[in-house]
Amino acid sequence: MAVATDGPVRADRKTQQRLERGEAAALGELYDRYASLVHGLANRVLEDERAADAVTREVFGHVWENPSGYDHRKGPLRTWLSELTRTIAVRRLHAAGTAELRRRGADPEDPGALEAVEELEARVREAAVAARADYIVTSMPAPLRAALDLAYHHRRDYRRVAADLGVTEEEARRRIRLGLQLLATARTVSTPLTTPASPPDSGPRSAPEAAPGSGRVSAAEAAPPHLPEYTPVPPPDPGGAA
Amino acid sequence: MNRPPQTPAEDFPEDARPGDGPGHRPAGHARPNRSHAGRWSGPGDRPEPAASARDTRTPGAGDDAPSAPATHRALKSLLGAWALSVCTPAEAAAVDAHLPGCRRCADEARSLREAVHLLQRPESLDLDPMLRTRVLDGCLDRRPPRIPVPEWAMPYDAETARLDALLQDIDEAEWHAPVRLRWIEEDEERQHRATVAKVLAHLFAVDGLVAVALGLPDPLSLPTGIGGAAPIRGHGTPTARTRAYWAALNRPPTREVRAPWREQSHGLVRTASFTGTTGGLPVVYGPCEIPLRDAMLERAFACWVHGGDIADAVNYPYRPPAPRHLHAMIDLAARRLPEAIAARRRAGLAAPGPGARHLVPAGRPGRSLLLEIEGRGGGDWLIPLDSPAALPSENHVVGQVVLDDEEFAQLVAGHIRPRDAAAGQTGDKAAAVADVLFAAASLSRL
C-alpha cells in the first residue's frame, strides 16, 4: 500500500513546495490537472456555469495563497481540492438561498420560516452529497468503476459484466457491491458550511460567515466511515473450467 | 423453475449506442430507474412502470440455468447486482424474500439502492478555454509570483493548455481523423496527409528542439513510444526531426502521444521560468540559432496553427490566441521577414530589386515596406527590403501591406496563398509587396 501511494504522495508534496515558493508555472500545471474536476464539482452543486467559474477562481486563488493548508498525511491533493471546492460551492449555494429567502421577505431567524430554511438546507445537503458522489466515482479503483459503468450505464447483467471484464461471476458481484458501498458513503459524511481548519478566504465575493441556520448542517466533518477494503483479484485462469 | 424466454441483452438499444465510446460519458442520457417495485425502494425511488418489463431479461452469457441462491452469504453477495437490477428475476426474488428476515442485509440493501441514484451524473461541461487566463491572472494578482512565467513563454503556456483542453474532449476515433497539413515551400503549395495523433507527434518532436536546449530529455531519444533510437537527435531541422520521429514509431501514433507531449510542454514552461527574464539562451533550430524567447514564441504559433488544423478535423471551435499573444507572434514573423526575403532572393525566387544595384551597407537606411496589421493583435512594422542588415526607414517606404491580424498569421502559416493575400494591395512597387507576401508564406513549413 505504501509502495503504491509513494509516487503520488511525493508528486503532491512537490507540487505543494513549488506553490509555496511562488512558482507560477506550478499554478498553471495545477489548473491544467484539476480545473475540470473543480469546475465539474462546483457545477454539480450550483447548477450554474457562471457560478461554477467563480468557485473555480476562488478555489485556485485559495490554494495559491495558502498552499501550506494542504496536509499530505490526510490524503491526496486531489481530495483536498475537491473538499475545498465542495465547501466553497455549498457555502455559496447556501448564501444564495438565504439571500433569496430574505428577498422574499422571510426572515431565516423567524421560526415561521423554518420550513423554508429546512427545505433550503435539504437541497444544500443533497447537492453536497451529489458532489461527493461524483468525486467518489472519479476516484474509486478502476476495476470497481468499470464494473459499475457496465452495469449501470451500459445496462449489463452481472454475468455479462463478468464476461466483459474477464472475471468470475462472483468477482463481478463483489465489484458491483463494493462500488455501490463506496458510493453510499457519500451520504454518511456531511459537508460543513464552515470548515474549522481551512476557511477559504473568499475575499470580496465572501459569503456571509456562519450563515443563519447553518448550525444544523455544520457538524464537523465526520471521520470517514469504514470503507470496504478492495483487493484486486486476478482474472480466472482461462485454461481452467470457467 | 420456469424461466421467462431468453431476452438477449442486444434487444436493448442502449447497449449498442455508437456514441457511447469511452470518450463520451453516457451520463447525459436519461436512464430509466430500474428498481424493483417494492417496499425496499429508497425514498427517492420512483420505479417506472415500463422498467419492470426489463427486469425479466436473463443473462446473455451462460446457458445453464442458475439456481436461485439460498444461503445468507450468497444472497449478501448479490445485493449490489440486486440494487442495480442486473441479476435474474429468480435471484432478485430470492433476495426480496430474504430481506424482511435479515436486518443487516436489509440495511445494506436500502443503502445500496439509494447509492444507485448517485451514479446518475449531469452532462459534463466543456471548460471555457478563456477561464484559465482569468483564473490564473486572478491568483497572481492576489499573490505575485516569486518565479513568474516569463512574458515570452506565456503564449506557449496558453496555447498548449488550449490544445490540451481540446484533446481531452475528443474520443478515441477522432485521434485518427484525417488532417491535411498545408504549407508553402519554394513558392509552391505543399500538403501532407496526417491524423490528429500524427500532428501532435509532430508538435512533440519539434518542441523537442527547445527541450534539448533547456537540458530536458529529447523526445527523439526517449525509449517510450518509439521502437528504436531515431537517427536524428538533438538538432536537425524541425521537418527532419518530425519525419525521423514519425519513421521511428512502430505504428501510427495514437492518443498515447498526448501524455508525453503535455509533460514536455509543462516541462518547457517550468524550466524556462528558471532561465531568467531575457530568454537569450540559444536554441539550435535547424541550420540557425535563435534565442529561447523567439523559439518559445515560434512553438506557441505552431501550436495554435496545428491546434486549428486539429480543431477543423474534429469540428471543434477554435479561436485565435489572446491579442497580446497574437501580437507577439506577428512581431516574431515581422522580424523574420528580412531574412526570408534575402533567402528567396538567394534562391532566385525574387528578382533583385533596384537596391541590389547598390547594396545598402549594413546599418544604413534602405528601401522599406510598411506592414500594417489590423485587429487587436496588430500593429505597424517597417520591413527593410534590401538586406537583413539594413535599417528600415520611414523615408524610404516603397510600398504598404495592409492585412488583418489573423489573415497575416494564416499567411505565415502557409494556409493562405500569397497571391490571394496580395489581392487589393496597393503600392508603387507591386513587386516589393509580392516579395514580402511570398517571404511571409515561405516562413511556413510542415
Image: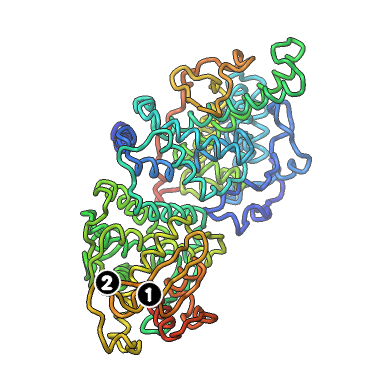
User: Mark 2 = which residue?
Assistant: B237
Query: How many numbered marks appear?
Result: 2
Q: Is residue A36 left or right of residue B345?
A: right
Q: Secondary structure at mark 2?
A: loop
x and y percent of residue A153 in the render?
Answer: 60, 46
How far apart are the alpha carbons under marks 1 and 2? Answer: 38 Å
User: In the image, is residue B211 above or below residue B346?
Assistant: above
Q: Secondary structure at mark 1?
A: strand
The disc label shown at residue B395, or none? 1
Please tell me how crowded label 2 is: few (under 14), some (14-19), or many (20+) other residues with Cα within 10 Å.
Answer: some
- Quadrant where the N terminus of chain B sits is top right
Q: Image quarter for residue B159? A: bottom left
Please tell me how crowded label 1 is: few (under 14), some (14-19), or many (20+) other residues with Cα within 10 Å.
Answer: few
Q: Image quarter for residue B256? A: bottom left
Q: How is the image coloured?
A: rainbow
Subunit of label 1 = B
The residue positioned 46% from the left and 37% from the top of the image is A139
The residue positioned 51% from the left and 27% from the top of the image is A202
Q: Image quarter for residue B76? A: top right
Disc 1 and disc 2 on one polypeptide chain: yes
Nearer-the-camera pick, A210 or B144: B144
Subunit of label 2 = B
Residue at the right extreme of this rendering: B49
x and y percent of residue B364 in the render?
Answer: 26, 74
x and y percent of residue B375 in the render?
Answer: 52, 62
Circle 1: residue type: Asn
Q: Is residue A195 left or right of residue A126?
A: left
Nearer-the-camera pick, B125 or B268: B268
Residue at the top extreme of this rendering: A111
